[in-house]
Amino acid sequence: QSVLTQPPSVSGAPGQRVTISCTRSSSHLGTTYDVHWYQQLPGRAPKLLIYGDNNRPSGVPDRFSGSTSGTSASLAITGLQAEDEAEYFCQSYDSSPSDSTVFGSGTKVTVL
Amino acid sequence: EVQLVQSGAEVTKPGESLKISCKGSGYSFPTYWIGWVRQMPGKGLEWMGIIHPGDSDIRYSPSFQGQVTISADKSISAAYLQWSSLKASDTAMYYCARSMVEEVITPFDCWGQGTLVTVSS
């Protein structure tokens, strides 16, 4: 089973840009799958933020963007706002076992 | 409006059985996968498994295989997660979530509100 590693926390001042990385374990080097990102506000259910590497569902501000490079993906938040303080999780397909999925370890974003 | 509504919070004892539900509305329930996700207190998201209500095709995470049972009843647009013998370590919030695209298990574009399960003697 794959492991997706994220930094435990990132922080930034209002208006700044922050990025969150999501790195797949080495057992799947050379294999690329779509990465999705979720935002979980305190006490709420997760919400889909980015899908298919860099697509935003309707209603998600364009301050949020995704990118991928090899076995890593990143979520960027530009123009950080107080309401962005939340936990962020990446997710990707997993081929072992077949047709399954895995979540990243999660990153807490703090707005200073 | 696409919606998933989960059953209410449960307080149970170790060794007891439990079945929680997730009811979909606003879309063709048999067509989209429904996944279950565990979140232990203060921890991250863990994918438990997923079911296709149309044909009851089920995939389990190796971490949860044999620990829980996932099922669905497409006639009433409901999916279920059940335990035969709960442990204190099963205390967590459990979310159901719908796949965004037919026939593909990720991403999850609609989530239930969560069901808090507390297991304590």
Image (cartoon, rainbow, N blue to C red):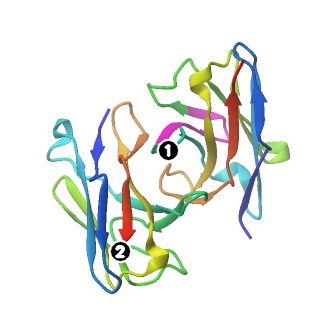
**Residue B111 on image: x %, y %:** 63, 56
Q: Are marks 1 and 2 on the same chain?
A: no
The residue tagged 1 is B42
Look at the numbered discs 1 and 2 and tell me whether their residues touch, using CB distance below 8 Å: no
Q: Which residues are magenta?
A: B45-58
The residue tagged 2 is A112
How much space separates mark 1 and mark 2, taking CA atoms? Answer: 21 Å
Please say if A61 is above or below B90. Answer: below
**Residue A64 on image: x %, y %:** 38, 77
Q: Furthest residue to the right?
A: B76
Q: Amino acid at mark 1?
A: Gly
A7 left or right of B62 in image = left
Q: Residue at x 26, y 53 (%)?
A: A7
Please say if A51 is above or below A102. Answer: below
Chain at numbered mark 2: A
**Residue A46 on image: x %, y %:** 54, 58
Q: In which quadrant is the N terminus of chain A drawn?
A: top left
Please say if B67 is above or below B49. Answer: above
Q: Secondary structure at mark 2?
A: loop
A32 left or right of B120 in image = left
Q: Nearer the viewer, mark 1 or mark 2?
A: 2
A101 left or right of B9 in image = left
As rendered, which of B72 and B85 lies closer to the eye?
Answer: B85
Q: Amino acid at mark 2?
A: Leu
Chain at numbered mark 1: B
